[in-house]
Image (cartoon, rainbow, N blue to C red):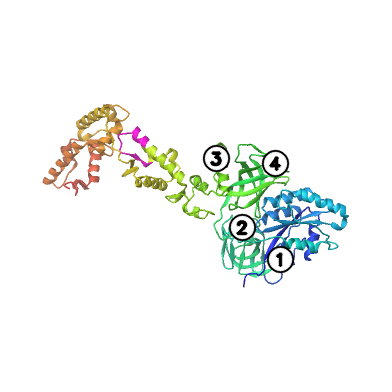
Amino acid sequence: MPEPSGATWVVGTAGHVDHGKTSLIRALTGVDLDTRPEERSRGITIALGFVPLDLPDGRRVAFVDVPGHERLVRTMIAGATGIDAALLCVSSQDGVMPQTREHLAILQLLGVEQGVIALTKADLVDEELLELAAEEIAEEVEGTFLEGAAIVPVSAVSGAGLDQLKAALSALNVTQDEVAGPFRLPVDRSFSRSGFGTVATGTAWSGTLSVGDAVTILPAGKTARVRGLQTHGQDADVVRAGWRVAVNLSGIDVDDVPRGVVLTTGSVPSTSMIDVTLRLLDAAPELDDGAAVRFLVGTAEVLGKVHLAEDADTLVPGAEVVAQVRLDEPVPVLPGDRYVLRRTSPMDTLGGGVVVDPWAPRLRRKTRERHGQQIRRLHAGDRRVWLERAAEVRLTAAEWHSRPGATDDLGRVLGDRRFATSVIAKLEGVLINAVERHHTERSLLRGAGRRELLRGRLGHLDAKIFDALVRRLVDAGALEIEGKLVRRAGFVPALDPGQKQRADALRKAFAAAGLEGLTLKKVFEVVSGDDVEDLVHWLDHEGELVAVPQAGWLDAKAVATLKGRLVAHFEGSDLLDPPAFKDLTGLPRRVAIPLLEWMDAQGWTRRVEGGRVSGEALTG
């Protein structure tokens, strides 16, 4: 099956519920918008929710099926990306009504850029009233996308003005550029047909979809395969952004594809915390920070709260700000998606705007000014903001590449995550300062352990990221690694005069203790000072002490003497039993057992029944 031929673009009809919209579309097309055709008995041809009209220039338009005010509002929002132009219907008798203004405001919020105004019921008023109505409409649309648009008086009863209305639609400069990104179809209707299974319909927002493709149903994450496609009444192998589409799905139940879900072939986040731009309508009431709202995007409608990323507690009508919307349920969105906010009750339209960051960290009141600046920068195209937020949202390198506009030249990878270069530089500074502080506070140690450094301002980092950060600074020549210790490059512990005196006192104490050694508790009984423990570790590293688990530290000379005695013993005997070991050392059992186990661990001895035999390392 080839792709459908001929350009078809979608016109969103808007206007007060009694202003003749349905009658006008029936007069133009011969189809009643209030009547949904039954599905054909064969095939999967279905009511796609549009009524087609062939224009004089050969192009075809599709009027979105939107009977009723509430349904009209939801359908306009659902078809935001698919609406190429608007047809605003205003009664010549009544003029502009509150619903007219609301619909115009919604179309404006959704980014519709052109359209035509139909002055309906023109046969019911005289020329003077018709002119006054046209002047009123022209004033009403000043400053909107319909300023300067054609205003065409029409009569659905007599047919007057219908040709002029078609000509005005033909004069619109509608282009349908391919929208990049993963295929996305917000589902506005789904049903099951015997012999075909589940069918879902909607307006494709981006990308392309082919028969046989696998799709994911968000936010649930279930999968299905495309069995067949239709668009604008024709079978198709491929459908594109901007087209009304029916998708026949296999491997999924119709209950799993309700209105409000999104069919997609790519990576789309399902989120309940979204940074946005927000414009409050001129006619809307003031909006308090934290106010409950209805969030409408695509075909989804979810309750939530709006939090201002501004130094304000109330948003006044007409204001344009940045904010964060926190939803009760996740919705699948991408940057650039347009949304509308409505009251929870009554369901009046409050305003709307553009999704800026669907991966946003939580907005906190004490940092909301900085958060707001980040939203503005990101909205202006500065993708580095995502990297500045990487630590908070735990951005992986793979996730980075799934974001629109994310490139390899931005930021760097640490471990398996991507950070802004400025953030990495800041982390490097924090780590170097932590190492220097450790050297100052514990100058006798040869470095700091990971546990000591991976705390405070570095405490949020995973071990893999921390190790990568250390490696960067080692490669740059700023740090050195010795085993598990990290230190400043070139750092060597040095004793001051007072420490030298205390070190000498410790040497004498350990020499006097011999093989019995000293625990830290006993050390503090001999020498006092805040740095005594570090002095013990310094002597250990210098090779003057030997650490024996459960026994403390032993004088290295005493241990060397013991080794010599062991060698001599095994020259005359194959076995070292407990009495023989006590003769060699004079140690009580509480000290002898830890020392024997330490000797086994060193390979000096090997335990056998009745005692120990010589180990391979004893004479090494």
Q: Residue at x 30, y 32 (%)?
A: 533
The answer to whether residue 107 is above or below residue 249 is above
Q: CA distance from mark 4 to mark 2?
A: 32 Å
Where residue 384 sits in the image (x, y, percent)? 51, 48
Label number found at residue 370: 3
Residue designated by label 1 = 60
Going by the numbered disc 2, the residue's amino acid type is Val
Residue designated by label 4 = 317
Q: Is residue 442 magenta?
A: yes
Q: Residue at x 80, y 60 (%)?
A: 24
Q: CA distance from mark 2 to mark 1?
A: 27 Å
Q: CA distance from mark 4 to mark 1?
A: 39 Å
Mark 4 touching mark 2, by CB under 8 A? no
Going by the numbered disc 4, the residue's amino acid type is Pro
Going by the numbered disc 3, the residue's amino acid type is Arg
Q: Residue at x 83, y 60 (%)?
A: 155
Query: Which quadrant of the structure image shows residue 483?
Result: top left
- Secondary-structure class at tag 1: strand
Quadrant into which the N terminus falls: bottom right
- Secondary-structure class at tag 2: strand
